[in-house]
Amino acid sequence: MDSDLSPQDKKDLDKFIKFFALKTVQVIVQARLGEKICTRSSSSPTGSDWFNLAIKDIPEVTLEAKKALGGQLPGIGRSMCVEISLKTSEGDSMELETWCLEMNEKCDKDIKVSYTVYNRLSVLLKSLLAITRVTPAYKLSRKQGHNYVILYRIYFGEVQLSGLGEGFQTVRVGVVSTPVGTLTLSCAYRTNLAFMSNRQFDRSAPIMGIIVDHFVDPPCSNQRPANMGHPCNYRAPDEEDGSPFAGVQDSQEVCTTSFSTSPPSQALHAGKEGGVALAPVQPHGVDAHLTVEHTPNTPGSSGDDVGLSQSGEGKRDGGRRSDSPSDPVESLNEFTRKVGAFVNKPSSEITAASLDLPFAAFAPRGLESEEDDLMVQPPASPPCPSPLQASLHSQGSEGSGQQDDFVMVDFKPAFSKDDLLPMDLGTFYREFQNPPQLASLSLHISSQSMADDLDSLPEKLALYEKNIDEFDAFVDMLH
Amino acid sequence: MNCRSVVLEVTVEARQVEEAMLSLLHTILLHRSSGKFHYKKEGTYSIGTVGTVDIDCDFIDFTFVRISSEELDRVIRKAVSEFKDALSNSGSDGVGQISLEFYQKKKSRWPFSDECIPWEVWSIKVNVVNLANEQERQICREKVGEKLGDKVINIVEVINRHEYLPKMPTQSEVDNVFDTSLKDVQPYLHKITYQITDSLGTSVSTTMRRLLKDTLAL
C-alpha cells in the first residue's frame, strides 16, 4: 500500500523508474554496437543527464523501449527485458543473452526516494556499464560485421529464458529497494556457443539444425510473431556535432539535478556512524526544477516494430581485438576458429589468393575495396523481396521466413563517393555478397585439377630438395 | 564503525600487471565517484555529470570502463606504475598487494591532527607468473580476461549491497568526505598503498603510504 508515499514522492519514483528503464536499454544496446563508448564528464549539470551519468540517447532505441513499455512501468510481474541475439549472414540466429529489469514485492518504506533511491539507481547504472563489458556477448559484438550482426529486442512482461540453451548463467547486476518494491537488474547469458565453434565456412554443406533452441515466441502480449529484433549498429552523431545529443526526447521532462545537503539520510542512518555533523533536513531533496507531467505514450502493443530501418552504419574499431599474426596460415586458422576474425585484419596483410589454401574463395571478398573497416550489414528489405533476401535465408532455416524485420535501407559504405566509380561501392558489395559457386570447387573440375596437382608434385619436391639449404637458413632466422 | 574490507586475488603475467590493476581500480572508482557538487543557497546542491570511457587492454582479452577524467586516470596510472616497478624489482616470484582505501577525515581540535577513518578498503593480491611459450601466453590472455570479468562481478556485487556510505556532506564538510581537487569528477577521499613480499614471504619494503590528494595539508 502506498499510503506512506507522498504524491510528490510517488510521482518522482515513477519518473525515476521510467528513465532508469530507458537508460538501462540504452546502456545495453550501446554496449552491443561493436564500438567503444566514450562520453565526457561535465562539472556543470545539464537537465538531460539522468542519474548524473553521461549516457547518450539513441532515438530509435528510446522509441523501441517506449513502445515496448507501452506507457507502463516495470512492476511486479511486469518485467522489462532486452534480448541480445546474433544473426549470421546465412540467416541463422541465436539468442546470446537476456537482460531483465524486474520488481518484486519487497518494499522499503523508509527509504528516501529523491535521494537514496536516485543515487542507488545511478550506482546500478554504473554497474550495468561495467557488467555489459564482461559477459561473453561483448566480445562477439565487438567482432560483428561481415559474418554476423548483433540484434536487440525489447519486450515487456514475462521473462523468457528458454532460448538461451542449456546451462545458461545468470549474473545479478544489482538491486535497489524502493517504497513500492525492489528493482532487480540481472543478465542471463548463454554459455553453450557450440553453434559458433562448429560452424565451418563451407558453403557446400551448410550445417543446419544444430541449434535446437532456436528463437521461440515470447508468451508476452505481443500479437506479432517472433521477430529478430533490431541491429545494434547505430552510428550516433559525433559529439562535435554542435548540438549536444538530446538527452531526453520528451522535452517536458527534466531530470533531478538538485539535492539538499545531507540529512534526508539522517533518520535513515541513525544506526550507522558518521563522522560529520550535519545541518537540519529538508523534507524533499528535489528542487522545484522538475516540471510538467510527461505526455502519455501512445498505446501500442509491447514488443518491437516491424521494419525498423537503420540508415546509419557504424565504423568498427577494427584491428584491435586480435594480434596480427605474422604467419598467414595461423591467421587463416584463426578465421576458421573464430567467427569474423578475419574482418579485424587490415586487408593488405593477407590476401587469400596468395596463400594457395583451400577455401581461399571464402577469404574476404571485396575486402580490399573496403579498407576502412566497414560495419557492413547484409542488406535486406523485408517488404519487397529481393534476390539478396533469398540468399540470407538459407533453405531449411526455421523461423527465418518470419524474420523479415531486419531491414537495412540506404546502405552507405563509408568514404565512398558516387561519382568516383561507375559502380557504386554499395552495389558492388551487394552483388558480390552472393557470388555463384566457384568453378574450381565443383566436383568434376576439382578432381581434374587434383590429378594435375599430383602430377606436378614430384617436380616440386625435387625443386624444394634442391633449395633445402635456403629453407633451413630461413627457419634458423625465425628462431 | 567497522571498515569494510574486500580482498581480490589475481594471477597474471608480469606484463599484464598494469592493465589488470588499472581495470580493477578503475571499476571500483567508477562506482565510488560522483559528479562535482555545486552548492547553492538554501542548502541545496546539484551534481555534475560523469562520463565513461571503454578501455581495451593490450595484453589481456578484456575491456573495462573507467570514469572519463584524465586527471584521475593519471593519478591511478602513476600509482599502478610504481607498484608494477616495485613488483618487478623484487624478483621474479614476487607477490604483491595493492590497496585502495576510502576514508573520511574527522576534524580534531588543535594540537591533534585530523583523523583519517577508513570506511572501505579494497585489497588486490597479485601473483606474478612466468610463462614458457607463446601458446601459454595466448591462453593466459584469455584466462586472465575471464578472471578479471569475475572480479568485476565481485566488485559490483559488494557495491550493490549498499552498505555504509558516508553521508552527503554540507558545503563546509565536503572536503572531509570527497576529493574535490579534480576539476571534472569527485571521487570519495581515497589513497592507494602497496606492499611487496618476495618469494620467501618476508616483506622487503614496508608499506609505502602515498597520499594521492592532500586537500588539507597541515
Image: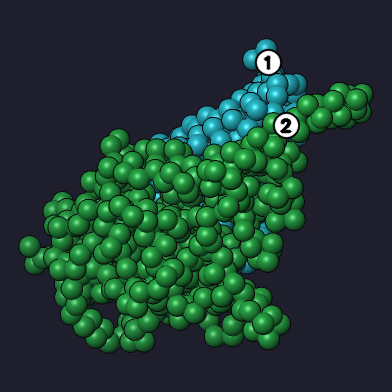
Q: Which residue is mark 2?
A: A455
Looking at the picture, how far across and down is residue B36, in whole percent?
53, 67
Q: CA distance from mark 1 to mark 2?
A: 62 Å
Q: Nearer the viewer, residue A429 or A7?
A: A429
Look at label 2 and name its amino acid.
Asp
Q: Where is A155 relative to B23, above or below?
A: below
- Identified at 13% across, 65% down, the residue is A221
Left or right, B188 with reference to A108: right
- Identified at 47% across, 65% down, the residue is A378
Q: Quadrant of the N terminus of chain B?
A: top left
Q: Where is B205 relative to A199, above or below?
A: above
Circle 2 — which element?
helix
Q: Where is B48 relative to A91, above or below?
A: below
Circle 1 — which element?
loop
- Identified at 67% across, 59% down, the residue is B71
Q: Which label belongs to residue B199?
A: 1
Circles 1 and 2: CB atoms closer than 8 Å: no
Looking at the picture, how far across and down is residue A260, in whole percent?
37, 71
Chain coloured cyan: B
Image hue for chain A: green
Q: Chain of mark 2?
A: A
Look at label 1 and name its amino acid.
Ser
Both marks 1 and 2 on one chain: no
Q: Is residue B13 visible in the rendered structure shown here?
A: no
Which label lies toward us, 1 or 2? 2
Q: Nearer the viewer, residue B144 or A478?
A: A478
Give the quadrant of residue A226.
Answer: bottom left
Left or right, A336 with reference to A332: left
Looking at the picture, how far across and down is residue A110, in whole percent?
20, 57
> How many numbered circles does the render carry?
2
